[in-house]
Image: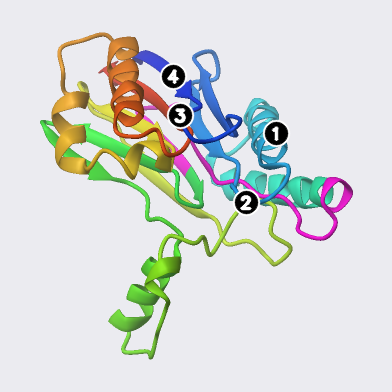
Amino acid sequence: MQLRSAARTDIGKVRSRNEDRLLCDDRLRLYGVADGIGGLPGGADAAQLAIELVQTGIRNLRKPGQLADIVREINTAVAALGRRVSPRQGIGTTLIFGVFRDRRLDLAHVGDSRCYCLRDGRLACLTTDHSVENEARAKASQGLPCWYNPAQRHALTRCIGQAASLEVDTLRHGLRDGDRYLFCSDGITRLIDEAELAPRLAAAAAPAEITRDLVTLASHRGGLDNATAVLVCVDKAE
């Protein structure tokens, strides 16, 4: 398999520090993003620990089906760190990562950082945000009563570091020549809609240029949050 990758992160224009962390490990073929939760102390610490433990877990990985187990172990470690550094509030982070092996992408996901696939000019989001709004929509689709405050629609319903038992979304996705995969934090997705993402990801440019373009655009639109983009181009899937 032949891959090209690049990653870029930016503090933005509002935050006092960058609490995003990224994975762009060509040796492990491991890519992803952790976005420390704003409003809680230690968001950067949570994201950093999550990224470090993902790398350790993938190095020791025996079966791809163990990704959810790795994430739950990370959740336990981050929660323990939270009890030490922020006993009243805890700490938290989102986490999205993927391993490219054997002509497939194995994904694990918690929170609202995303993974997109661009294939044959069409963009698809491979993840679903774990947000109040999406949870309410899921209940409504089942005919269950639901209500939420629109001001809280983006609030997370799952994160790494939570005390409760953690449900982890996983996905196995077959690769094709020419595919492009974007892992990104919400500092990108809240300022650049999917209609704009598709042509920018399809650009005839190096991955580093594309990630720079995305982060720069988010900054120009206000830089309301830390913005992180990790791009993986599949030149040959076999």
**Foreground: disc 3 or disc 4:** 3
Crowdedness of circle 4 by 10 Å Cα count: few (<14), some, many (20+)? many
Q: How many residues crowd mark 2 within 10 Å: few (<14), some (14–19), many (20+)?
A: few
Q: Give the residue pinned by disc 1.
A: 53
Picture quarter containing residue 136? bottom left
Residue 215: percent from left, percent from top: 36, 24
Residue 12 shows which numbered tag?
3
Label 3 – label 4 distance at C-alpha: 12 Å
The span from disc 2 to disc 1 (Cα, nearest Å) is 23 Å
Disc sitting over residue 39 in the figure: 2
Disc 3 packing (10 Å; few <14; some 14–19; many ≥20): many
Asked which secondary structure carries label 2, the reply is: loop
Looking at the image, tell me whether mark 2 or mark 1 is earlier in sequence order.
2
Q: Position of residue 58 (x, y in %)?
A: 62, 30
In this view, 181 is above or below 123:
above
For the point 51% across and 60% down, which residue is it?
156
Query: Residue at (85%, 53%) from the top-left corner?
Result: 83
Q: Quadrant of residue 95?
A: top right
On the image, the x and y values in percent for residue 93 come to 61, 46
* Above or below 46: residue 160: below
Q: Are marks 3 and 4 in contact (CB under 8 Å)?
A: no
Q: Nearer the viewer, residue 113 or 193?
A: 193
**Number of disc labels:** 4
Magenta residues (range):
83-107
Q: CA distance from mark 1 to mark 3?
A: 26 Å
Q: Nearer the viewer, mark 4 or mark 1?
A: 4
Q: Is residue 204 left or right of residue 128?
A: left
Is 123 in front, or is 44? 44
